[in-house]
Image (cartoon, rainbow, N blue to C red):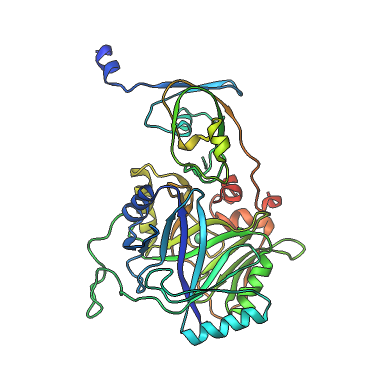
Amino acid sequence: MKKGVMRPGHIQIRVLDMDEALKHYVDLLGMIEMDRDAQGRVYLKGWTEVDKFSLVLREADQPGMDFVGFKCVDEVTLDNLQADLQAAGVSTQEIPAEDLKDCGRRIRFTIPTGHSFELFATKKQTGKWGINPRNPEAWPRELKGMKATRFDHCLLYGPNVAASVQLLTQVLGMDLAEQVLDPEGKQLAGFVTVSMKAHDVAFIEHPEPGKLHHASFFLETWNDVLKAADLISMTDTSLDIGPTRHGLTHGQTIYFFDPSGNRNEVFAGGDYHYPDHAPVTWDVEQLGKAIFYHDRQLNERFLTVLT
Amino acid sequence: MADVVLKSQPAKYWIQVLAPKQGFFADPQQSVLAAMEAAGQESIPVGCRGGGCGKCRIQIVQGQYFSKRMSRAWISAEQEAQGKVLACRVYARTDLNIQVDSPEIATACLAQAG
Ligand code: FES
Ligand SMILES: [Fe+2]
């Protein structure tokens, strides 16, 4: 948070069929539908999030991620970071306020891995869903499915991971929390944080730019991850792998797919990071264990199944 | 008794894979890919099961089918018109003859780790 970037604020994901997608994200994950716009986009959030939305679904004929946006502390910070990006040779585009409903202007730029990133500072705050901000109860009783608490991070695949990590750390003040290095010291994966979390966004080196590996949502406990797995079976949802633990970040996790083939994760736990922590390093020879700590080997889908 | 069971069962269609020479039954509510998995076969590669990743691409050589929307990253409009489809988004309406047609898919640069 050294330069005023606070947290992942939203991700816009393309889906092939909005009705199928909403059944998945609302009924199964337990995200809350907050609004819709004239373009047909649907705005959702996890119940603990104070901003109005964090997940935007757009129907399109090719699944994947449109962009991920990070929220900054204020509008002055936004101007400063835009100037810093331009000084670093990154061209930026200003998307006017209300292009996303109830969201202020956004500064958009493309990072070296080919993903569309945004910074913004203003979004309508509706507070945590279903509980009173004054004398709040522990949780709302009306939650569905996995009861996802928040959009937490995404894992992105593309070329030039080291350059994307460098941009986010040196220009935007984020921290490198974990990395995977090959024997020559080349960075093949970078887990980047703006908070105490082990990652707010992560990258893996891949020949094709701009790919989404997964969007991840946070659950409270390992037992919640197990129950999420039960729900995946009950609803005959496409399972990728889990429940298991990652070596990287040590989070407890399950991977599965939305009805358009976008991978989702729900997870609990995981390591923490302070700005004075040196990055945790995994050697690529230990990659199986780094990704799936119990199986200690990658499944082929982890390397190739992307949107 | 056998007769009653037969009448209450939905029509099943035979999906003939041309190479490797294999086949399986699919009911109309089940995608061709799901039917293959249920039959314990592996001729068509399985990825996301949602029409996004391209892994399960096949060519329908013969037969009628219904298909849901599939990612244009893997199936162009022309290909779709010629019966190139993603098996996870396709539902048999008659017996089908199919050919596995997996596209070239990039692999993350971690693969050398093995
Ligand atoms: S398995 Fe991914 S497109 Fe069919
Ligand atoms: Fe993750």
Left or right? Give the position of A133 relative to B89. left
Left or right? Give the position of A194 relative to B104. left
Left or right? Give the position of A39 relative to A300. left
As drawn, B21 above or below A207: above
Q: Name which residue lies at 26% across and 20% down.
A: B8
User: In front here: A35 or B35?
Assistant: A35
Q: Tell me where residue A215 appears, x and y as whole percent.
A: 48, 59
Residue B45 seen in this snapshot: no
User: In front here: A268 or B12?
Assistant: B12
Q: Tell me where residue B92 appears, x and y as whole percent.
A: 43, 27
Q: Quadrant of residue A289?
A: bottom right
Left or right? Give the position of A128 relative to A270. left
Q: Quadrant of residue A46?
A: bottom left
Q: Tell me where residue A63 appears, x and y as whole percent.
A: 50, 51
User: In front here: A282 or A143?
Assistant: A143
Q: Quadrant of residue A139?
A: bottom left
Exactly how many numbered labels are in the figure? 0
Residue A135 seen in this snapshot: yes
Name the residue at the right extreme.
Answer: A184
User: In front here: A18 or A134?
Assistant: A18
Q: Tell me where residue B29 appears, x and y as whole percent.
A: 37, 31
As drawn, A246 above or below A70: above
